[in-house]
Image: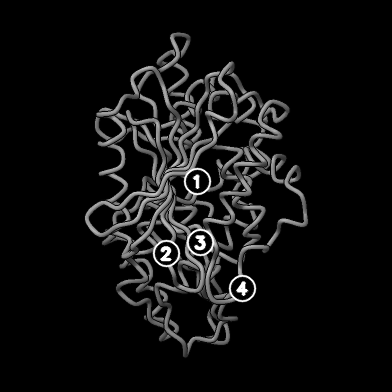
Amino acid sequence: MTPKRQLFRHGSGGRNGFHIGIIKEALTLPNFTQEEIAHLYHQHTEVSGQAFEANAVERAWYWTEGQPRLVNALAYESVVNILGKNYSQPITSDIINQAAENLILRRDINIDYLLERLKESMVKRVIEPVILGDEDWDEETTDDDIRYAQDLELIKQDGDTYRPTNPIYSEVIIRTLTQRLERRIPIELVNRWMDGSKLDMTGLLLEFQQFWRENAESLVTPYKYTQASPYLVGFAFLQRVLNGQARFISREYSLGFRRVDILVKYNQIPYPLEFKIKNQYFNAKKRDESLERLRSYIAQCGAKEGWSLIFEPTPNKNWEDKLYWETIEIEGVTIHVVGC
């Protein structure tokens, strides 16, 4: 029997008897469409009078891509934990964003299960190139590895490529892989570059250059994700230093370009960054193409300034050559190129 596509369960006592919960049947359902999420959330509105605004539904779709457990979890977090069942307040996009962040930071989305799976070699062979934004799969990676990661709902196919199943799982994967690394970041660096109004991203990244120089050889990424080590250490450093005071809005993996775009917001000010690992194909033309993509990304974020961290994996290269800082202007946008 096909389970009903139902989100909320209601008591018989009107508003006082209303309660919201994650139904077990949702685990067997295919992903919802955005229209179905709107319909499901409207069930709650019909009973309680509390509306989900249209942009809130859009954000729920963005964060979950229709994954039933997450669609339910976002609603529960918003209605019960954030608003305390105050049905007079509508659910807005900001509330949904906060709910998503709460789920990510609380790490209660099958986190122990996920932690164990990420240790497995067959999962690592798939997840690491996804983190790297690399279209070159390890020769040991098999179709069974990919299917296994898909069955675990860690990745999904998007055209000819693979990516994390949804933005929430993307964040949880990264935070799971970096939680041990965060403990290596000195506590005196936490919140150091925030003054309540703005974030000194330049000062923060100058400190990261020094940290990377002093610790790169000794930092072993969790579960041997060694190729992705620069990204994971960079993520861990930002997460530890920002300490929840600034929000990671998104991390987007750019398949085939070995780069990831990051958007941090502090006091509603956007700070776009790019992490990139150089390889044998990185030349002047590729560098110009990368900077143009970053310029476009910065403009799209509504910022005037951005930072490109370029990691040099060559082991025998002197740190004096690896570490540099170059500031350039492209079509009215300032880009800081940070060698690491």
How far apart are the two marked residues, 2 and 3, measured between alpha carbons? 19 Å
Q: Residue at x 39, y 54 (%)?
A: 306
- Give the side of residue 218 with respect to residue 17, left or right: right
Task: Let me know if residue 1 appears in the view.
Answer: no
Q: Secondary structure at mark 2?
A: strand
Pointer 4 residue: 195
Nearest to the observer: residue 128 or residue 79: 128
Q: Quadrant of residue 156?
A: top left
Q: Is residue 131 above or below residue 26?
A: above
Nearest to the observer: residue 69 or residue 259: 259
The picture places residue 168, in percent across and down from the top left corner, at 48, 51
Q: Is residue 98 above or below residue 16?
A: above
Amino acid type assigned to the residue bearing label 4 in the image: Asp
Identify the image quadrant of the C terminus. top right
Query: Which comes sooner in the sequence, label 1 or label 3?
Result: 3
Labelled pair 1, 2 in contact (Cβ < 8 Å): no
- In front of the other: label 2 or label 4? 4
Q: Residue at x 64, y 41 (%)?
A: 178
Q: Quadrant of residue 253?
A: top left
How far apart are the two marked residues, 1 and 4, measured between alpha carbons? 31 Å
Query: Which comes sooner in the sequence, label 4 or label 3?
Result: 3
| Residue closest to the far top | 139
Labelled pair 4, 3 in contact (Cβ < 8 Å): no
Q: Residue at x 48, y 9 (%)?
A: 140
Q: Is residue 241 above or below residue 155?
A: below
Pointer 1 residue: 169
Pointer 3 residue: 100
Amino acid type assigned to the residue bearing label 2 in the image: Pro
